[in-house]
């Protein structure tokens, strides 16, 4: 058997007592022809491998270059040097893969995140991205664990859909029709009858509508899958392909929904703090270095771990949209005309407004509820005031909107009236309306953008740095 290795994380968690071990990994550095720092991706820490002078061929030593892949067997012993507790006295070194140091794009120095994005295929070998993707993994695992503990069913909603859930965003078309000689109907329209599915289809922007179908039979479900939006927004918070978690609960109102969302967010943050301490310490350090470049007033008031701790230990602020608008109208930036966008009841809150509320006014996550019906989707439950709907958005410091959710309209006539008013075709969504025709129940749910959550926990300021291979306008490399 080839793989009898021990992972470096496990090895570093044990005691060095002269035992024989085998590790495999990539060379981070090789000092004085004697000290190899080896990393295998299981942890940010390297294991030091010592090559006793004279023991190995010059020819072999010359091949121990940065990012070469090695198999090392030897004795694990306490280290005499500073900076590490243990090291491997190399008995055998096998070069698994050479790496030409002259050509290798990653040098042992600081590279900008922008540069690393261009070599996203190699950035997993850096400390920063090792930490980010281990944290991302933990958060994903914690999400499944949270819902599993609560008895939710993981529902796989379709990626190719024929419905535009809610006009949540611009959609990517899915078709097998040719661009030239496109089949046309008599009146010149594209004839989708000849397309693969016999109708127009697109990549999903949200699994919610199908999620509601699941919840109104299974009780409580969640989705966790890729979502696509062809929005041409080049921001540090938008991707064309991102992952969304969408729980949907029968027998649930807006307050239950908010409580679940808050408990959920705290649970997964706590999980990462308990399981990824070393990575988060590293990311905190990284963020501090990065923020040194910024003027004092642009730096975070709290370091990364204190911020996460603070979120765990404090209840999210809950305010209505109307209260939020009132706060904004009385705010210094409004009075000094510092906001770019208008603040007025009935208009959507822009990112600058959301950030003022969470970062300056409340200084913690805020749940904004009861938005004007006119700016929200057709399926949100109409409030008795006739103007607002039972919506809730959760806003997080540094990120803005992280969750969007609502109690759904379960009353058939009200829902139909709303669809008519908003020009949502009822025939096409007849299957959706059936849940209201047969045993309708109060129900609610929300969508959490996974990458925004990963950004929040890792402190990475650009969403392109928390997904392995980002898809953004004019960029689908790798
Ligand atoms: P925004 O106003 O920030 O564009 P949205 O109102 O379009 O968000 P929803 O349709 O409510 O967002 O989607 C639910 C969640 O999905 C959001 O709260 C956010 O966390 C995430 N999200 C939405 N669009 C994107 C995107 N393009 N890239 C990454 N995450 C996104
Ligand atoms: Mn959007």
Image (tube, helix red, strand yellow):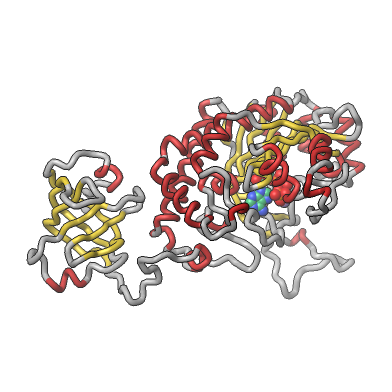
Residue 121 image position (x, y, % from top left): 45, 64
Q: Is residue 322 visible?
A: yes
| Position of 248 relative to 25 (above/below) | above
Q: Residue at x 58, y 65 (%)?
A: 476
- Considering every residue shown, the one lying at the far bottom of the view is 102
Q: Nearer the viewer, residue 430 or 276?
A: 276
> Looking at the image, which residue is at 45% across and 66% down?
111
Q: Is residue 143 above or below residue 125?
A: above
| Residue 380 visible in the shown view | no
Say left or right for 142 vs 236.
left
| Relative image position of residue 198 (x, y in whole percent) | 73, 56
Q: Residue at x 84, y 28 (%)?
A: 411
Picture coordinates of residue 223, whole percent (x, y): 60, 39
- Give the quarter of the image for residue 250: top right
Q: Residue furthest left?
A: 54
Establish if 88 lies above or below 157. Answer: below
> Which of 359 and 229 lies nearest the eye of the viewer?
359
325 to the left or right of 45: right
């Amino acid at each position: 058997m080839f793989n009898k290795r021990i992972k470096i994380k496990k090895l570093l968690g044990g005691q060095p007592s002269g035992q024989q071990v085998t590790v495999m990994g990539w060379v981070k550095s090789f000092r004085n022809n004697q000290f190899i720092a080896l990393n295998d991706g299981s942890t940010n820490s390297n294991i030091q491998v010592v090559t006793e002078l004279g023991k190995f061929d010059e020819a072999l030593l010359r091949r121990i270059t940065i990012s070469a892949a090695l198999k090392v067997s030897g004795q694990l012993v306490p280290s005499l040097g500073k900076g590490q507790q243990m090291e491997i006295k190399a008995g055998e070194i096998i070069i698994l893969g050479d790496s030409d140091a002259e050509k290798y794009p990653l040098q042992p120095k600081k590279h900008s995140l922008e540069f690393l994005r261009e070599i996203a295929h190699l950035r997993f070998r850096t400390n920063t991205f090792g930490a980010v993707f281990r944290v991302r993994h933990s958060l994903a695992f914690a999400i499944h664990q949270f819902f599993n503990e609560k008895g939710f069913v993981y529902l796989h909603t379709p990626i190719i859909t024929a419905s535009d859930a809610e006009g949540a965003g611009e959609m990517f078309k899915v078709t097998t029709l040719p661009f030239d000689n496109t089949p046309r109907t008599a009146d010149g329209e594209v004839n989708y009858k000849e397309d693969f599915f016999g109708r127009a289809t697109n990549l999903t922007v949200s699994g919610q509508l199908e999620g509601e179908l699941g919840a109104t039979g299974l009780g409580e479900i969640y989705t966790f899958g890729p979502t696509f939006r062809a929005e041409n927004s080049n921001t540090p918070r938008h991707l064309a392909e991102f992952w969304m978690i969408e729980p949907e609960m029968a027998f649930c109102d807006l307050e239950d929904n908010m409580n679940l969302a808050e408990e959920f967010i705290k649970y997964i943050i706590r999980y990462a703090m308990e399981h990824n301490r070393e990575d988060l310490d590293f990311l905190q350090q990284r963020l501090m270095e990065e923020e040194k470049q910024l003027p004092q007033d642009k730096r975070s008031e709290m370091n990364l771990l204190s911020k996460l701790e603070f979120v765990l230990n404090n209840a999210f602020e809950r305010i209505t949209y109307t209260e939020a608008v009132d706060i904004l109208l009385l705010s210094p930036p409004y009075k000094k005309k510092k906001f770019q966008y208008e603040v007025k009841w009935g208009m959507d809150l822009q990112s600058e407004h959301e950030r003022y509320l969470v970062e300056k006014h409340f200084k913690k996550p805020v749940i904004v509820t009861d938005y004007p019906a006119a700016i929200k989707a057709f399926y949100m439950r109409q409030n008795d005031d006739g103007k607002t709907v039972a919506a809730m958005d959760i806003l997080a410091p540094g990120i803005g909107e992280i969750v969007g959710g609502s109690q759904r309209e379960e009353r058939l006539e009200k829902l139909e009236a709303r669809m008519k008013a908003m020009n949502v075709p009822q025939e096409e969504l007849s299957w959706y309306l059936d849940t209201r025709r047969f045993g309708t129940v109060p129900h609610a749910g929300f969508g959490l953008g996974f990458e925004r959550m990963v950004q929040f926990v890792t402190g990475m300021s650009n969403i392109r740095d928390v997904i392995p291979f980002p898809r953004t306008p004019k960029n689908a490399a790798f």
